Image: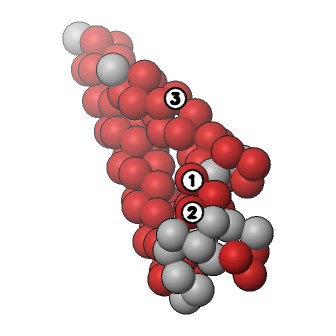
């Protein structure tokens, strides 16, 4: 399950970073060839906040992978000691 979450996170981050399909670029200010639904300055704030959200999501997915790996290693060490 942790691998599925991590793969999903990476896919979503890659999709978000592709500028041609980026919703915030499309809706952003006309100064960056957007449709001006989100005013100048606010669009940059939205980009920063979504970037932080995806960063923390990826960190959480990486942490889940790390915990799973540590638990697996601990179980293997216990099996070897037995």
- Residue beneath disc 3: 7
Do the residues under discs 2 and 1 have CB atoms within 8 angstroms?
yes
Question: Dot 2 corresponds to which residue?
Answer: 27
x and y percent of residue 54 in the render? Answer: 47, 55
* Residue 76 shows in the view: yes
Q: Which residue is mark 1?
A: 23
User: Residue 64's x, y, as percent?
Assistant: 34, 39
Q: Where does the image place residue 27, in percent across and percent down from the top left?
A: 57, 63
Q: Quadrant of the C terminus?
A: top left
* Residue at 53% over, 39% down: 12
- Pair 1/3: label in front: 1
Q: Nearer the viewer, residue 75 or 45?
A: 45
In the picture, residue 2 is in which quadrant? top left
**In the drawing, does residue 29 fall left or right of residue 72?**
right
Q: Nearer the viewer, residue 47 or 1?
A: 47
Marks 1 and 3 sit apart, C-alpha to C-alpha, by 21 Å
Q: Secondary structure at mark 2?
A: helix
Q: Is residue 80 left or right of residue 3?
A: left
Q: Point out the tag, 2 or 3, that comes first from the N-terminus.
A: 3
**Residue 70 in view, yes or no:** no
Q: Earlier in the sequence, mark 1 or mark 3?
A: 3
């Amino acid at each position: 399950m942790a691998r599925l979450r991590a793969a999903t996170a990476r896919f979503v981050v890659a999709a978000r970073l592709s500028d041609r399909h980026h919703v915030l670029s499309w809706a952003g200010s006309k100064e960056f060839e957007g449709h001006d639904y989100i005013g100048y300055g606010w669009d940059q704030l939205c980009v920063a906040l979504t970037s932080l959200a995806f960063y923390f999501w990826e960190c959480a997915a990486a942490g889940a992978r790390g915990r799973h790996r540590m638990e697996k290693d601990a179980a293997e060490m216990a099996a070897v000691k037995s």
